[in-house]
Image (tube, helix red, strand yellow):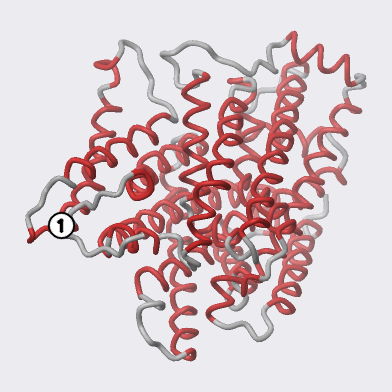
Amino acid sequence: MNNVLLPLILFLYFGLLFAIAYFTSKNASSHSFFTGDKKSPWYLVAFGMIGTSLSGVTFVSVPGAVSTSAWHYYQLVLGFFAGYFVVAYVLLPLYYKHQLSSIYRYLELRLGLRAYQWGAGYFILSRTLGATVRLYLVINVLQLFVFEPIGLQFWQATLLIILMILAYTLKGGVKTIVWTDTLQTFFMLLALVVCIVTLQQQMNFSWSSLWKELQDQQLTQVFSWNPSKGDYFWKHFIGGAFITIAMTGLDQEMMQKNISVKTLKDAQKNMVVFSFTLLFVNALFLLLGSILSYFAFKNGLDFTPDDLFPKIIQTYLPGGVFIIFIIGLISALFPSVDGAITALTASFCIDIIGFERRNLPEQERMRLKKIVHIGFAILFMLLVFFFKWYDDKSIVKLIFLIAGYTYGPLLGLFAFGILTKRKAPALFIPWIVILAPLSCYVLSENADLVWKGYEFGNEMLLINGLFTFILLFISSFVTNSNASNETSPI
C-alpha cells in the first residue's frame, strides 16, 4: 500500500475535526468550554459517548482477548448496563439539583473542602493515567502501520498526535467535543461492521454456519462460574456495575457532556439509550474477536492478542478494508484523549485553581485555561513515553487496575455523602483516602490468605470504596472540635 496514503487520510481526518472545532468554538467563553452552555442535544451526547466509553482499548484489545477468554468480558458489560441506571437515576439528579460545572463540587457541599480537593485529585490522577494508557496503545498501532513506513519515530508520532488534539480542543471545549465525538463514533462503528462482514465473506460461511463453528471452538462462551478466578461471573457483573458508577457517574469527563444537556429528563434519556446501545456494540466487538480468533486458528496464525486484529486485517483482507480499519482506529483514539484533556482542564481550573470561588476576569480565566490545557497535553506525552518504556502488562488489565485503586476512594466519598447524613472530620479525610487503596494493595498481594488460589478481579474497586466508606463512617463519631469539618447542609 502506498506509504503516503494512510498519513494523508490521517491529516484529512484531522482537517475535518479542526473544521468542526472552528465552527463550534466561535464566541466560546471559559464557561462554555466547561459546560457547553447547557445546549448539547441529548441524542448527540448519547451517540458520542459510545466512542468515549469504548476507545482504542475496546477497538484493539477486546477482540484480541477473545482468543484466551471467549466472551467472558461480556459479563462485565452486563454489569456496566446495570450501573448506568444508577448513574441516570441517582447521580444525575444530584448534579442537576446543584447545577454543578464540576461534579466534585458536591463533595464540598456535603463533606467540605478537603473531600472536594481529594476527590478532584483522584479523578485527575486516574483519568490522566487511564487516558494515556489508551493513547499509548493506539499510537503503537498507528506507529506500526502509518508513521513507521514514512520514517517517523515513536516520539515524533506521539508529539504529532498530541498537537493535533490540542489544535481542535484548545478553544471550544465541551461544545466541540460533543460534535467531534459523534463523528468519530460513527467512523469507529462503520469500521467495526465492515471488518465483521468482510471476514465472514472471506471465510465463505453463512452466518448460521459461522456461528456454529465459533460455538464448536468455544469462542462464544459468556459465563465463568469458578469463584476463585478473576473472571467469575459475579465478580465481573458486580465489579462492572461499580466500574460504571465510578468511571462514568463519578468521572468529570463522562459527566461533563451529560450535564451539558439542558434538562435532567433529557440527560437521563441519553444515559438509558446509551446503556442499551452499548450492550449491542460490545457484542459486535466480541463477535469480531471470535471471528478473528477462528480465522487465526484455521490458518495456523500465531499473534499476540493486541496484534490479532490489525495484523489479520492488514495481511489477509483487501486494502480498502485496512484503510477503513485505520480510520476506525483513529476514531477510537481521538475521543479517548480529547475528552480527557478537556475534562482534566475543567477539573483543574474549577476544582484546584478555583474558578468558581475566585472572582477572576474572563481574560485571566481564558489565559489560565489555555496554560492548563497545554500542560496536560505535555503530561500526556511524557506518560506515553513512560508506558513505551514500561510495556510489560496487558493494557486492558492495567486500565482496570488503575481504576480499582484510584476510583475506589471517589466511590467511598460519594457513597458516604449520599447514603448518610454524617460528617467526617476534615483532618481525617486525606489519611482515609490514602489508607483505603493501600489496604487494598496489601490485600491483593496476600490473596491466598483470603482463599487458597483466589484471584482478585474487578471487585477490588468495590472493596476499595467499601474501605473508604467504613473509615469515613468510623471517623464521623469523632467530635473533637479541632477536627471539625466545615460543610454546607444539603
| Amino acid type, callout 1 | Leu
Residue at (54, 57) in percent of width and height: 255
Residue at (70, 49) in percent of width and height: 329
Which one is in front, 380 or 87?
Answer: 87
Give the quarter of the figure containing the C terminus.
bottom left
10 Å crowding of disc 1: few (<14), some (14-19), many (20+) = some
Residue sticking out furthest to the top: 216
Inspect this view and state whether residue 30 appears: yes
Q: Quadrant of residue 267?
A: bottom right
Which residue bears the numbered disc 1?
427
Rendered position, 348 above or below 425? below
Give coordinates of residue 308: x percent, y percent.
67, 31
Inspect this view and state whether residue 377 appears: no
Q: Quadrant of residue 69?
A: top right
Give coordinates of residue 348: x percent, y percent.
40, 69
Residue at (53, 80) in percent of width and height: 30
Query: Is 206 placed left or right of 41 in the picture?
Result: right
Secondary structure of the residue carrying tag 1 is: helix
Which one is in front, 74 or 325?
Answer: 74
Give coordinates of residue 97: x percent, y percent.
50, 62
Which one is in front, 319 or 402?
Answer: 402
